[in-house]
Image (cartoon, helix red, strand yellow):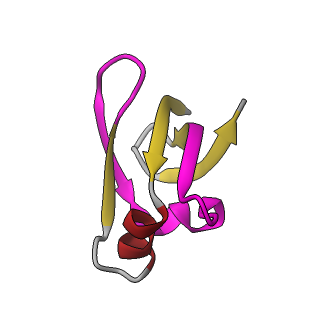
Amino acid sequence: MIEYYFRLNLSYNECMDYYHGRYRSVQVVDDSGKTIRFAANYLRPYISSLGVRGRFRLILTPENKFIRLERVA
């Protein structure tokens, strides 16, 4: 398993662009400075009236296939 930790701070309006499919992927920079891109639809469970805010962990297989995205404290 490969894990990436990052912070995300998107407004509600920015999230709606992702939610409605205007963008297919999200690009973030993890804590070590590496740029990571993943499918925007994985953010849907985390969208609130404030948008998406918090620290997340992206878990991938050794072949870089998505396993899960989770919010961490």
Q: Quadrant location of residue 16?
A: bottom left
Q: Position of residue 60 (x, y in %)?
A: 50, 43
Q: Locate residue 25, reporting x and y percent.
A: 32, 62
Residue nearest the observer in this picture, 68 or 48: 48
Residue beneath the point at 46% across and 44% down:
9
- Left or right relative to 9: residue 38: left
At x 52%, y 62%, the residue is 42
| Quarter of image, res 24 | bottom left
Query: Residue 30: x percent and y percent?
Result: 39, 28
Depth check: 47 or 30 in front? Answer: 47
Q: Nearer the viewer, residue 17 or 35?
A: 17
Is residue 11 positioned above or below 16 on the image?
above
1, above or below 16, in the image: above
Q: Residue at x 38, y 64 (%)?
A: 14
Which segment is the magenta one? 29-55
Task: Specify the quadrant that holds the C terminus.
Answer: top right
Does the magenta run of residues contain 66?
A: no
Q: Which residue appears farthest toward the bottom when viewing the image?
A: 20
